[in-house]
Image (cartoon, rainbow, N blue to C red):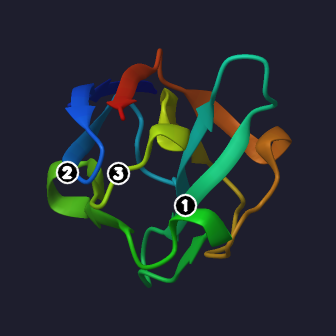
């Protein structure tokens, strides 16, 4: 499976961006997908995750109400709509895919088998 992120860039605080993740290869069996981010000198952080079949979602507290994760299974795409961006959202954003065997939420990075190369999001103040 290959995951390719796009949509990152430079935006002013309060602005919006939409990240996309395109999955290709053997995508059958993906149960959960997620967006992670890593800011300079900070650990990798789960931003949001989605159960691919049922659409259940979870978000880290700092993005609740501002970010929305979604997926289009027919197109093998996942998205992260980001609004009201803050400088602290600056990071490299990665998409990830898990094959859990069951449709379930996954909060652990170690469970995600495939990762994209990342896309930079920079929010200026």
Query: Marks 1 and 2, how far apart in space?
Result: 16 Å
Tell me the distance, in whole angstroms, between the alpha carbons under discs 1 and 3.
Answer: 15 Å
Crowd rating for badge 3 (residues with CA inside 10 Å; few <14, some 14–19, many 20+): many
Q: Residue at x 56, y 27 (%)?
A: 115
Frontmost of labels 1 and 2 is 2
Mark 2 and mark 3 residues within 8 Å of each other at the beta carbon:
yes
Disc sitting over residue 16 in the figure: 2
Q: Judge the density around disc 1: few (<14), some (14-19), many (≥20) Cα neighbours within 10 Å.
A: many
Is the residue under label 2 in contact with that under label 1 (CB below 8 Å)? no
Q: Closer to the camera, 39 or 102?
A: 39
Picture quadrant of residue 38:
top right
Query: Which badge, 1 or 2, is on the more N-terminal residue?
Result: 2
Marker count (numbered): 3
Give the Cα separation between the discs numbered 2 and 3. Answer: 6 Å
Identify the residue position indicated by label 3 in the image.
Answer: 85
Asked if the residues shown at circle 1 and circle 3 are in contact, with their CB atoms under 8 angstroms apart, the answer is no
Q: Residue at x 34, y 29 (%)?
A: 124
x and y percentages locating residue 20 in the rendered image: 25, 41
């Amino acid at each position: 499976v290959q995951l390719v992120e796009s949509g990152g860039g430079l935006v002013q605080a309060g602005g919006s961006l939409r990240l996309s993740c395109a999955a290709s290869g053997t995508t059958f069996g993906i149960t959960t997908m997620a967006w992670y981010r890593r800011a300079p000198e900070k650990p990798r952080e789960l931003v949001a995750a989605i159960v691919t079949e049922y659409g259940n979602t979870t978000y880290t507290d700092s993005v609740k109400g501002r970010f929305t994760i979604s997926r289009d299974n027919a197109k093998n795409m996942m998205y992260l709509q980001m609004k009201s961006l803050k400088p602290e959202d600056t990071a490299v954003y990665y998409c990830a895919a898990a094959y859990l065997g069951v449709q379930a939420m996954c909060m652990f990075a170690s469970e995600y088998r495939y990762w994209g190369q990342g896309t930079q999001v920079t929010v200026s103040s």
